[in-house]
Image (cartoon, coloured by chain):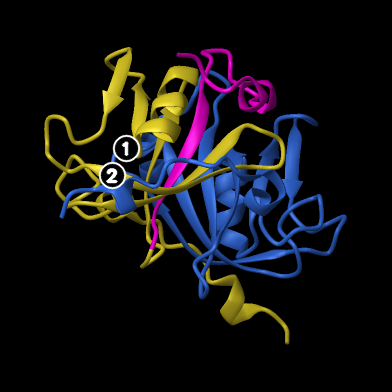
Chain colours: A blue, B yellow
Amino acid sequence: MPLDADIAARLKRDPAGLVCAVVQQHDTREVLMVAWMNDDALHETLTTGRAVYWSRSRQELWRKGDTSGNVQRVVRASLDCDGDALLLEVDQRGPACHTGTRTCFEAGGDLGAVNGLAEATP
Amino acid sequence: MPLDADIAARLKRDPAGLVCAVVQQHDTREVLMVAWMNDDALHETLTTGRAVYWSRSRQELWRKGDTSGNVQRVVRASLDCDGDALLLEVDQRGPACHTGTRTCFEAGGDLGAVNGLAEATP
């Protein structure tokens, strides 16, 4: 069964047919990871309650947690204003990152940006 | 002045030389928007305390708020595990979205996903 036609018409896909998905833990609001979806992945995500992505490295659907057990249950999915990004609010079981950290941004780490809030004029 | 060489070496850019940036309000933890950075945009973001992106539509650096006044002060910038996504924690003045809503995902709206948490077995 294909993706709902109204939703499909609103997507602005990249040249590889993908839309970026930001994945957020629904209660703590941590940003867990960024992944990519094609139409099939989005359709499965919206209709099964489990987050499914397109693996760019393996070039196949990636039902997150099938191998690791670290499943993401979907709470809400939203599209952005211009149709090229999704926000997926989930309940993440275990770590989201393949390195074993809770989020992929902990794994990569802080880049030491100048704090613009501290320096801002009132 | 170019981007710090150690950081530049860790980035995994797309064919257009860009990395995806997830932008989050630092205190409420709302996901505000997704934007794109090239090396110059990231360098300016890390060193000036203001969020700067690469506008894919205009093909130029986009110092967010220069036109609208809706500046983003940077609180923290993190890279993800595989170097192809950034998390930018900011203080957003006014709406983040060009449509006037606080976040770009309010503008696009809820896609009506099945709630996988409600249906999950205990």
Q: Considering the image in quadrants, where does the C terminus of chain A appear? A: bottom left
Amino acid bearing label 1: Arg
> Is B90 in front, or is A4?
B90
A50 on left or right of A6: right
- Chain letter of mark 2 equals B
Q: SS of the residue at dot 2?
A: strand
Q: Which residue is mark 1?
A: B50
C-alpha gap between disc 1 and disc 2: 6 Å
Numbered range of the magenta stretch: B1-26
Q: Is residue B110 within the magenta segment?
A: no
Q: Earlier in the sequence, mark 1 or mark 2?
A: 1
Residue at position x 32%, y 53% in the image: A118
Vertical relation: A64 (above or below) B17: below
Residue at position x 49%, y 24% in the image: A14
A68 on left or right of A56: right
Q: SS of the residue at dot 1?
A: loop
B84 on left or right of A71: left
Question: Are dots 1 and 2 in contact, CB under 8 Å?
Answer: yes
Vertical relation: A108 (above or below) A45: above
